[in-house]
Image (cartoon, rainbow, N blue to C red):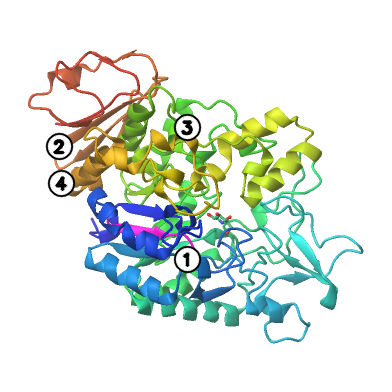
Amino acid sequence: MEQQWWKEAVVYQIYPRSFKDSNGDGIGDIQGIISKLDYLKLLGIDVIWLSPVYDSPNDDNGYDIRNYTEIMQEFGSMEDIDELIAEAHRKGIKIVMDLVVNHTSDEHEWFLESKSSKDNPKRDFYIWREGNGDEAPNNWESMFRGSAWEYNEPTEDYYLHLFSKKQPDLNWENPALRQEVYKMMTWWAEKGIDGFRMDVINFISKHPDLPDGEKSHGKEFGNGAPFFMNGPKIHDYLQEMNKEVLSRYDLMTVGEMPGVDVEEARKYTDSSRNEVNMVFQFEHMGVGDGVEEGKWSNNAWELNELKEILSRWQNGLETTGWNSLYWNNHDQPRVVSRFGNDGQYRVESAKMLATLLHMMKGTPYIYQGEELGMTNSEFTSVHDFNDIESINSYYDLKNRAKWDEEKIMNALKARSRDNARTPVQWDQTEHAGFTTGNPWLEVNPNYNDINAEKCLADKNSVFYYYQKLIQLRKTYPIIVHGKYELIFKEHPQLFAYERHYEGKKLVVLCSFSPEKIDFDYPSLDKADGKELLISNYSQENQPEALRPYEARVYLI
Ligand code: NOJ
C-alpha cells in the first residue's frame, strides 16, 4: 500500500468570488480568504482548492483566463496570493490551484496574436478550420449552447470553442503551446503551491479529423463528445506534463473529467503510469439526467442507481488508482437540496450525506458552505441568474425546446450552477456578513437560519459534524485504507456498506427516507464490543429502526 499525503487529506474548495469580501465591493477576495483561515483550521481541513483567481474578463467567472500569472483585480494582487500561501502553510494548510488549459480567454495575448493573421507565430496555439461555405467546420454544440465554432473575420475561418465563444480551445497538438503551459505550471510550482485541479483536462486531445457528431431528437447540433473526451493522445499529454512538471515537485493532482468511466479512470490514476493522482468523475451527479435535455430534465432518481454507481467506482479503483469523493462544487446544486431534504430534515440529511461520502475510500472534497448545510437558493426569474450556462440554457429551452416558463424555472432552480455560487452565509447581519457592499449575486434569503456564526455556537451543528468526520479519518486508518463492500444492495431507502482493514470492520448505515425504516442486521446486533463512532441522532437506547435520514457508523 502506497502512503501519500493526499490520500489522507480532506480538501475544501473555495470559489473566491462568493467566499468572503474584505473591501466592500460585493465580490469575494483573497484577503477575505485569509481572514477565514482560522475558521478552516477549526474545521480541520488539510488542503484548499482555489477556483481560478487569475486575470479574467469573467465571461465564465474566471474559467476564461486572460493572463495565467496575474491575479484578477477584484480578488487582490500577487502579494495577496503570496500572503495566502504563506499564511496557509504556517497553519499547516496546503493550497491547490485551478489549472485551466483546455482553453483561454479570447482576450489572452496568445489568442489576440493567433486570430490576427494566418502566419502569426501563435497561429497554431488554437484550433482553426475552414468553414463549409457559410457553415461551421462541423456540427458540434458548445457546452454552453449554440455552435462550438466562431467565425473570425480577419482570417476568414473559424476557431473551436467547446465552452463560450470567449473561451477558445488551445491546440495541444502544438509542442510549442505545450511547453508554454508547462512553463506556466512550473512558475506556480516554484511559488510553493501544493497541487493542481485540472479543468476539463480530458478534453485537451481532440480527434484530428474533428468529425461531425451524432444528432438526436431533431436537434440542430451534433454531439462532439466522442471526439474530444478522453481523446487519442490524452494519456501521452498527461505523461509528458508529469515528466516535465509534476514529477519534479510534491504536488497533488486531480483531473476534472466529464464522461470518464472506471476503466479509463484506472489508467489516469494508476500511479505506475505517472499521470494524475485522482479524477473527478461525473456519473453519480448525473442520476436523473434525461437523454434529451441532460441535467435540465431533472427526472426522479433512484437510490439504487446511486448505490450502483458509487459502489462501482469504489470497487473499480480498489487496488489500482484512487477516488475523489464529492457531492458539491461550484457547478453543482447544493447536495442537501439535491439528494437530501432541505426542509424539515435539513440538518439530519446534510449530516447523513456527509457520513456516506466521508466514510468511503478516497479523498473527500467539501465545497464552501456544505459544512453549514447550505441549500439551493430562491430564483424567481431568469434575471436572478448570473451563470452563462443558466442564462443560455433558459433561452435555448424556451426557443428551441418550447418549454413553458414554469418548467424552465423549475429545471433551473433545481440544477443551476448559481445555486452553488450564492455567497457564503457567515452571520445574521445584512448580506449574511459576506460583504458590506452589494453582493454580485444575491445571498440566499435563508441566511438568518443558516449561517456560520449559528453553526459555531451549536455543538450539534452540521459544522461540528463535519469536523468530527475529518477527525475520524485522521484517527482510524480503516477509513483511509479499508476495502469497501456494499451491503443491503436492494434496499430502496438504505445505503449501507462495510469497510474492511486488518481484521477490523467499519459499518456505515445511511437512511435516505423521511420516514422510519426497518433494518434487520443480526450480525451487527451480535457483534461484541462494537463502538459507535458517529451518528446524527442520539443513540441512547439504539432503536431497531433508522429514524429519518439517520446515519450510524460502527467499528467492530
Ligand atoms: C469546468 C468548470 O468547473 C466550469 O465551471 C467551467 O465552466 C468549465 N469547466 C469551463 O472552464
Q: Which residue is mark 3?
A: 337
Q: Looking at the image, can residue 135 be seen?
A: yes
Read off the residue under disc 1: 75
Q: Which of the numbered marks, if any, corresponds to residue 475?
A: 4
Is residue 482 visible in the rendered structure shown here? no
* Mark closer to the chain start, 2 or 3: 3
Q: CA distance from mark 2 to mark 3?
A: 35 Å
Q: Is label 1 in a helix, a strand or a loop?
A: helix
Observer-nearest of 151 and 482: 151
Q: Is mark 2 within 8 Å of ligand 1?
A: no
Residue 498 sits inside the magenta stretch: no
Quarter occupied by the C terminus: top left
Nearest to N terminus: mark 4 or mark 1: 1
349 or 495: nearer the eye?
A: 349
Identify the secondary structure beneath mark 3. Answer: helix
Tell me if 20 is positioned left or right of 126 in this view: left
Measure the alpha-carbon separation of dots 4 and 3. 31 Å
Contact check, label 1 and label 2, Cβ < 8 Å: no
Q: State yes or no: discs 4 and 3 in contact (Cβ < 8 Å).
A: no
Check disc 2 and give the amino acid type. Answer: Lys
- Name the image quarter holding residue 61: bottom right
Left or right of residue 269, residue 43 in this image: left
Magenta segment: 45-53
Q: Is residue 384 above or below residue 353?
A: below
Q: Which residue is mark 2?
A: 504
User: Which marked residue is nearer to the observer: mark 2 or mark 3?
Assistant: 3
Say what secondary structure mark 4 lies in.
Answer: helix
Of the residues shown, which amino acid type is indicated by label 3? Ser
